[in-house]
Image: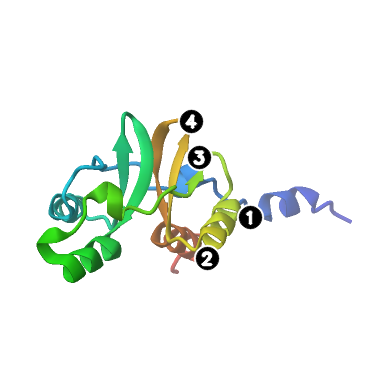
Amino acid sequence: MTDNRDDEIRSVPTVPTVAEVMTSRVVAVGPLATLHEALAAMLGAGVRHLPVVHDGRCVGLLYECDALWELYLRAESAGRAGVCARSPAPFIAPDASLDAAAQVLELAGADALIVGQGDRIAGILTTTDVVHAIARAGATPSK
């Protein structure tokens, strides 16, 4: 009889950490940025969420859909990024598991989390990042 415990241990899937899945290239705006400026930054970076940072601290998370809706409703009298941002931004540590991040996303009713420790922003984790990680984990090499 052979001992298959080593094979069993190797076959247990590991849950990735937030740091392994997050987008680490972060573009941010200040609270006084206009929504046009914020949307231009999003377009240039190819993202849909921007941290709003004041004095080195994240004070909110601006969603593309919120900025567009605000501009649609109020046109030129639309508020600034800091007013339109969702605050406080949902936050998670880089060493948290993807499972924990999914729970935070669900509880916050959010589709993005600021990743960091203390005041330092290390990245952003979006539902798109989570879906890509799940797809990669379930992918099988083609033969």
Dot 4 corresponds to which residue?
A: 118
> In the picture provided, is 1 more to the left or to the right than 118?
right
Q: Nearer the viewer, residue 116 or 29?
A: 29
In three-dimensional space, the C-alpha distance between marks 1 and 4, rounded to whole angstroms, equals: 30 Å
| Residue tagged 1 | 13
The disc labelled 4 sits on which kind of residue? Gly
Amino acid type of the residue tagged 3 in the rendering:
Pro
Mark 2 or 4: the one toward you? 4
Q: Amino acid at mark 1?
A: Pro
Disc ID at residue 94? 3
Image point 48% across, 30% down: which residue?
A: 118
User: Element type at marker 1?
Assistant: loop
Q: Which residue is mark 2?
A: 138
Is label 3 or label 2 in front? 3
Q: Earlier in the sequence, mark 3 or mark 1?
A: 1
Task: Mark 3: give few (<14), some (14-19) or many (20+) Cα within 10 Å.
Answer: many
CB-based contact (under 8 Å), mark 3 and mark 2 = no
Q: Earlier in the sequence, mark 2 or mark 1?
A: 1
For the point 47% across and 42% down, the residue is 19
Within 10 Å of disc 2 (Cα), the crowding (few <14, some 14-19, many 20+) is: few
Q: Give the Cα distance between marks 2 and 1.
A: 10 Å
Q: Disc 3 versus disc 2: distance between alpha carbons?
A: 23 Å
Q: Amino acid at mark 2?
A: Gly
Quadrant of the snapshot with the N terminus = bottom right
13 relative to 78 in the view: left or right: right
